[in-house]
Image (cartoon, rainbow, N blue to C red):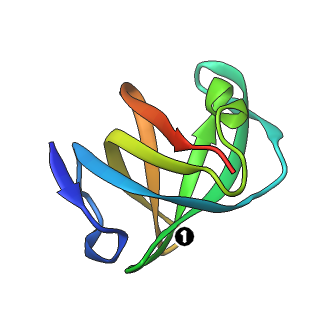
Amino acid sequence: MVRVKIGEIRPGMRNLDVSGEIVDIGEKREVETRFGLAMVAAAVLEDETGSIRLNLWRGQTDMVEVGDKIRLVNAFVRTFKGNIELNIGRDGRIIVLTRR
């Protein structure tokens, strides 16, 4: 596991431990995946070094709220339409540290 600040995140990184505050969450929407229908929402995670899009899938969409300070364990980075984004896979976790 690699503990990083958001400003240090680069494409292709894996096994990340990242902490920050949720500053925005977009609308939940249903999308078709290869595993069937799934709910997805885009959040923005921020720390003192920057901000990054965080994709929330399925049950993750109900786990966090704007203002929550969270820690992501075993996150990974993907590039989508030229932008880097954080994702939490099956082996990852979202830990809510403090609720607003």
Horizontal and vertical percent position of residue 55: 57, 48
Q: Residue shown at 41%/78% (left/top)?
A: 48
Horizontal and vertical percent position of residue 87: 45, 46
Of the pair 66 and 57, the residue shown nearer to us = 66
Amino acid bearing label 1: Lys
Which residue sits furthest left? 1
Q: Residues within 10 Å of mark 1 (few under 14, many from 20)?
A: few
Q: Describe residue 3's horizontal placement relative to residue 81 as left or right.
A: left
In which quarter of the view is residue 35 placed? top right
Q: How many marks?
A: 1
Q: Residue shown at 33%/47% (left/top)?
A: 76
Of the pair 68 and 26, the residue shown nearer to us = 68
In which quarter of the view is residue 84 placed? bottom left
Which residue sits furthest top? 35
In which quarter of the view is residue 42 placed? bottom right
Horizontal and vertical percent position of residue 83: 49, 72
- Residue 66 versus residue 94 in the image, above or below: below
Q: Residue shown at 70%/39% (left/top)?
A: 40
Horizontal and vertical percent position of residue 56: 61, 41
- Residue 91 versus residue 49 in the image, above or below: above
Q: Residue shown at 26%/58% (left/top)?
A: 12
User: Where, quadrant-wise, is the N terminus in this rendering?
Assistant: top left
Q: Describe residue 7's horizontal placement relative to residue 37 as left or right.
A: left
Circle 1 is placed at which residue position?
A: 81
Badge 1 element: loop
Q: Describe residue 97's horizontal placement relative to residue 68 as left or right.
A: left
Q: Describe residue 64's horizontal placement relative to residue 17 as left or right.
A: right
